[in-house]
Amino acid sequence: MKSLADELFLQIKGTDGKAQIETYALNTPRIALYKSWTGSMDEGWTRWLFEQFEFPFKNIFDADIKAGKIKAKFDVLVIPDMNTQSIVNGHKKGTISDKYAGGITEKGVENIKAFIQQGGTVVLINGGAHFALDKLGVPIGDALQGVRRYGGRGGPQGIPEFVCPGSLLKMKFDPTHPVCYGMKEEAAAYFSRSCVFNASSDVVVAGRYAARDILMSGYLKGEEYLRYKAAVVEARQGKGKIILLGFSVQNRAQPHNTFRLLFNSLFYGAATTP
């Protein structure tokens, strides 16, 4: 156990008795990482991270999602930082070889919904989380909708009201939630064209932006739009889960402290209650 911990840079702690918290039986997750033909740098970072930390995974392409029966092969589907248009529509037909044209289409969206209903977990990273708002019916809103901002998903034109061009922001996490196991209650998050959610009571918020003094390093204009807004969210549909990691938890494979949010999501997605 010690040699494994040393090799993988893990801290393993034992207990004398049964933990007085809700526990889960961990299973090896069957992981699918979505790879679009439009290309995603974020997918590359995520793939490299899975390889380095020895997670078994397979890339899943548009055709695989359109074919359906995802749950028969996978427990967890990871969607990297991409916009909904690229995921659903992909390259326009006639601009590239037919083999690489199009996206998952609305048929693929329905197949992902079926995957969730059947007990699958979808994990969406950074801007990819908007796919859950746009297509999966997650009952939360974009807190920056209608705000003039620099970068992100567009918005009204004019002098930006919100600017955060790649900065470290103060977050508040719930370390009792399975996605946040091992996190301190307060930690830094890397924000780059990231998400700010208005969450409803129908979802569980596991991580929020701090209520004040949010900027830890970098530049931030418009702190008031972030205060205590949701960033890490779990939603339930049918037998499955949708986990939104609304900031760049694995940006360029550098922010080691927030890798665990992604890794925990993978294990949580395949876990069962003993």
Image (cartoon, helix red, strand yellow):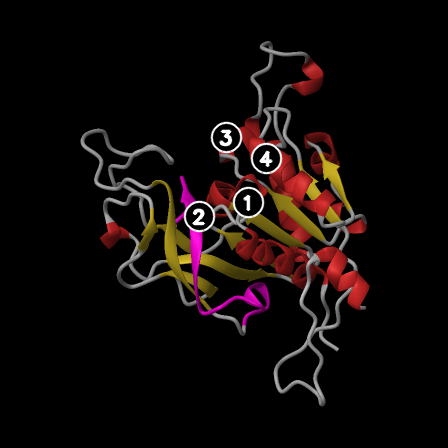
Q: Earlier in the sequence, mark 1 or mark 4?
A: 4
Query: Could you say where residue 113 lies in the image, as x and y percent from the top left?
Result: 62, 49
Secondary element at tag 2: strand
Task: Based on the picture, tell me whether residue 99 belongs to the magenta stretch.
Answer: no
Q: Amino acid at mark 1?
A: Gln
Q: Amino acid at mark 2?
A: Tyr
Q: Earlier in the sequence, mark 1 or mark 3?
A: 3
Tell me the CA gap for discs 2 and 4: 32 Å
- Residue identifier under label 4: 106
- Residue identifier under label 3: 85
The residue depicted at 31 percent of the width and 45 percent of the height is 144
Mark 1 or 2: the one toward you: 1
Magenta stretch in the rendered image:
177-196
Along the horizontal axis of the image, is 267 left or right of 133?
Answer: right
- Residue identifier under label 2: 190
Secondary element at tag 3: helix
- Residue identifier under label 1: 254
Question: Counting other residues with Cα less than 10 Å from the Cα at mark 3, is it few (<14), some (14-19), or many (20 or more)?
Answer: few
Q: Amino acid at mark 3?
A: Gln
Tell me the CA gap for discs 1 and 4: 34 Å
Query: Could you say where residue 63 lies in the image, as x and y percent from the top left?
Result: 72, 30
Residue 43 vs 274, above or below: the answer is: above
Along the horizontal axis of the image, is 95 left or right of 156?
Answer: right
Quadrant of res 44: top right
Circles 2 and 3: CB atoms closer than 8 Å: no
Secondary element at tag 4: helix
Quadrant of res 23: bottom right
Circles 1 and 2: CB atoms closer than 8 Å: yes
Tell me the CA gap for discs 2 and 3: 24 Å
Whether residue 124 appears in this view of the structure is yes
Image quarter hosting the C terminus: bottom right
Which of the labelled discs sits on residue 223, or is there none? none
